[in-house]
């Protein structure tokens, strides 16, 4: 990934802005926003996860975030609260008690879902976010201006912001271990998981495997893969024994999240007709008012 | 040229035979090729194996006693390991699996032949192309954790792994297993279980365990199917019992008995006595049929439907010529042995003979038409 500084970005945007002024081309996704057939994903089998939280430790270590020693992660008292990923922990595991107390609790790992049609990419006004060929949704820190639109746009409320940093605060979220995968390794969480509840592989293969599992063990799983169709599909996929909405998964439709916002935004600015029409209307009102005033002064005199 | 052709003629059939030769490990197996192979003629190069047919073909001809006692799992050893290899107490686990579904609880895929372990199928590398089955580390842990966290609730690594920097060779329990002195205590089967139920009419449900195992000859696994360790070792057993629904509680009985209509079979206001054929049906099987198993007469599988109290259903047609009355313990005297069966046995069930046809003042069994003999 080529590094761009903020100055570069301003330069290019000024150039592009002047070049396309008046041409009103429809905003096309940047060339790096590709949806490769071989994009990777992760299948999370919540019926296998034992809630050991080793993935939390591995994630922090891989991203140079401060962390306590691995032994401290055996402490299960953290499960008394439902936690969310933030700028200090890019992934967290939560625990949900089963209705019948003799059944095992259900542990659910939460992190960025790496959408196929990411709302953050669409919402980012400086084009810092992008969907990469390997399925990951990542952002360029140097381009980011800290507007935090991505945080608002995300249907899973994942991107976090380093509010405590006064200088150069950054957006933080799971980056699918882009640096590890670039050097041929697999994401840190998928590598450490002792039970392989999280399987890294081609998204297509993962869906095939998940469907096979549901077919072979109909009593173990509900017949649904979360992320297969949600908001147009996500790279991270989940299997569960219980409806996902009961495990704090958001209730989402099948349409990509940017669909609505992009339609409105692009609609407003398409061919510059609506802004021109708005100014024409305002000008018209002004002109009428001016005429009226003129007439009034005329009659007074 | 001729020799070349000759050579070709000789080698061609040999080649074909070699191709069709069945692998020696497959011989003497009553298996159809298409159980495992998707193509008609599998070759060594192209095995075209179907994905695991799982429990359809699990065959392990080894008793827990013959199995290895302790297995050291060190397939995944690496320099950076935090823990020592696990000394897995295999034999104790194999014995305990008898409470559940046996060897296949762990050996969920084992075609006939040698017993295969996890590492024979599961890849050691996590980064792999075939993700249809977990990698070796995942497979081991899934297998262990599935039970272990159920009854201890613990997921700490150190319950199975000894730390690499510790002096201990393995976890204390594993050391004990190595000496061979860990056994699961025998499970005592109850004779009669009495349940207090909220049912207004019939507060006590009696379950006669003895009847089911001894009289009806059911095996443990006929009712105790796929039992997990959790069944006995649950963390809060009382809570799990109280959370059971009415349907859950009746589910096991429902396999054989109609629990919707037949309440009084188990529910009563007092503890019910054990099964007695004569009390239930009026036909005393202890007299002449005590050595028979239930299914000799009740031939419909699992569901014991009543018979029509008609001896001829099993015994064909009896006449005075082909039936030796002495087998009943009553040797008929000369006069009576000339009579037709129906003279005395007017009812088809042969239960209550009558003397009224000839004798007005005689009653069976006070008066006998012969002498009692030892059977």
Image (tube, grey):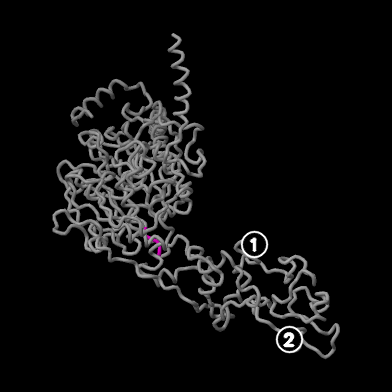
The one nearer the camera, B348 or A90, is B348
Q: Is residue A30 visible?
A: yes
Tag 2 subunit: B
The spot of residue B132 in percent (x, y) is: 39, 41
Residue that label 2 marks: B365
Q: Who's the residue at 41% across and 56% down the image?
A: A246
Write the start and end of the magenta stretch as one range. Answer: A101-105
Dot 1 corresponds to which residue?
Answer: B300
Q: Secondary structure at mark 2?
A: loop
Find the distance from the CA under tag 1 to the CA under tag 2.
34 Å
Q: Quadrant of the C terminus of chain B?
A: bottom right
Which x, y percent locates residue A4?
A: 20, 29
| Residue B309 horizontal/vertical position (percent) | 72, 72
Secondary structure under the numbered disc 1 in the rendered image: loop
Which residue shows up at 32% across the image and 26% down it? A31
Of the two numbered discs 1 and 2 on the same chain, state the one appearing first in sequence: 1
Q: Which mark is residue A63?
A: none
Residue B355, placed above or below residue B63: below
Q: Quadrant of the N terminus of chain B?
A: top left
Front residue (pair A139, B22) = B22
Quadrant assignment, res A248: bottom left
Assess disc 2: are there few (<14), some (14-19) or many (≥20) residues with their C-alpha within 10 Å of its C-alpha: few
**A102 falls in the magenta region:** yes
Q: Is residue A155 above or below residue B261?
A: above
Q: Quadrant of residue A202?
A: top left
Q: Describe residue B369's horizontal placement relative to residue B212 as left or right.
A: right
Residue at 37% over, 51% down: A46
Mark 1 belongs to chain: B
Main secondary structure type of the part rendered in magenta: loop
């Amino acid at each position: 990934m080529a590094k761009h500084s903020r100055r570069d970005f301003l330069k290019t945007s000024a150039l592009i802005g002047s070049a396309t002024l008046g041409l009103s081309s429809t905003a096309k996704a940047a060339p790096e926003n590709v949806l490769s057939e071989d994009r990777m994903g992760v299948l999370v089998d919540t019926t296998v996860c034992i809630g050991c939280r080793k993935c939390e430790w591995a994630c922090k270590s891989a991203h140079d975030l401060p962390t306590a020693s691995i032994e401290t992660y055996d402490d299960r008292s953290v499960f008394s609260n439902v936690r969310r990923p933030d700028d200090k922990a890019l992934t967290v595991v939560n625990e949900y008690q089963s209705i019948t107390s003799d059944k095992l609790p259900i542990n659910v790992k939460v992190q960025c879902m790496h959408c196929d049609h990411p709302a953050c990419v669409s919402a980012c006004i400086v084009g810092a976010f992008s969907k990469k060929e390997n399925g990951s949704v990542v952002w360029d820190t140097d381009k980011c201006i800290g507007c935090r639109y991505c945080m608002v746009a995300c249907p899973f409320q994942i991107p976090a912001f380093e509010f405590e940093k006064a200088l150069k605060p950054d957006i933080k979220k799971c980056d699918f271990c882009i640096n590890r995968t670039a050097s041929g390794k697999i994401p840190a969480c998928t590598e450490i998981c002792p039970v392989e509840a999280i399987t890294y592989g081609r998204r297509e293969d993962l869906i095939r495997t998940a469907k096979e599992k549901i077919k072979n063990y109909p009593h173990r799983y509900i017949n649904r893969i979360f992320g297969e169709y949600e908001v147009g599909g996500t790279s991270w996929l989940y299997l569960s024994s219980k409806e996902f909405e009961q495990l704090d998964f958001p209730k989402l439709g099948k349409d990509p999240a940017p669909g609505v916002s992009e339609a409105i935004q692009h609609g407003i600015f398409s061919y510059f007709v609506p802004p021109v029409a708005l100014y024409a209307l305002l000008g018209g009102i002004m002109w009428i008012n001016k005429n009226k005033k003129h007439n009034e002064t005329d009659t007074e005199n | 040229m001729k020799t070349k052709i000759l050579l070709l003629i000789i080698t061609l059939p040999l080649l074909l035979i070699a191709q069709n030769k069945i692998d020696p490990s497959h011989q003497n197996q009553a298996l159809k090729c298409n159980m495992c192979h998707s193509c008609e003629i599998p070759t060594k190069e192209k095995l075209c194996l179907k994905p695991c047919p799982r429990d359809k073909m699990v065959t392990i001809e080894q008793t827990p006693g013959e199995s290895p006692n302790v297995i050291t799992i060190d397939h995944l050893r690496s320099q950076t390991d935090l823990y020592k290899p696990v000394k897995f107490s295999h034999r104790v686990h194999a014995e305990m699996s008898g409470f559940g579904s046996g060897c296949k609880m762990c050996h969920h895929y084992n075609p006939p032949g040698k017993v295969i372990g996890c590492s024979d199928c599961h890849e050691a590398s996590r980064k792999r192309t075939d993700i249809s089955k977990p990698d070796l580390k995942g497979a081991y842990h899934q297998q262990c954790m599935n039970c272990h966290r159920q009854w201890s609730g613990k997921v700490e690594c150190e319950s199975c792994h000894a730390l690499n920097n510790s002096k201990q060779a393995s976890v204390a329990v594993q050391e004990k297993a190595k000496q061979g002195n860990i056994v699961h205590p025998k499970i005592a089967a109850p004779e009669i279980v009495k349940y207090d139920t909220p049912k207004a009419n019939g507060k006590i449900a009696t379950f006669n365990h003895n009847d089911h195992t001894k009289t009806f000859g059911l095996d443990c696994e006929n009712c105790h199917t796929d039992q997990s360790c959790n069944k006995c070792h649950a963390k809060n057993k009382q809570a799990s019992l109280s959370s059971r629904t009415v349907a859950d509680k009746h589910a096991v009985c429902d396999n054989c008995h109609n629990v919707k209509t037949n309440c009084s079979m188990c529910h009563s206001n007092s503890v019910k006595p054990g099964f007695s054929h004569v009390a239930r049906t009026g036909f005393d099987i202890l007299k002449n049929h005590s050595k028979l198993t239930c299914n000799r007469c009740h031939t419909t599988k699992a569901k014991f439907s009543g018979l029509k109290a008609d001896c001829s259903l099993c015994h064909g047609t009896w006449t005075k010529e082909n039936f030796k009355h002495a087998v009943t313990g009553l040797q008929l005297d000369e006069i009576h042995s000339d009579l037709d069966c129906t003279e005395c046995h007017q009812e088809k069930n042969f239960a209550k003979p009558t003397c009224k046809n000839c004798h007005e003042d005689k009653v069976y069994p006070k008066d006998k038409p012969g002498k009692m003999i030892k059977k």
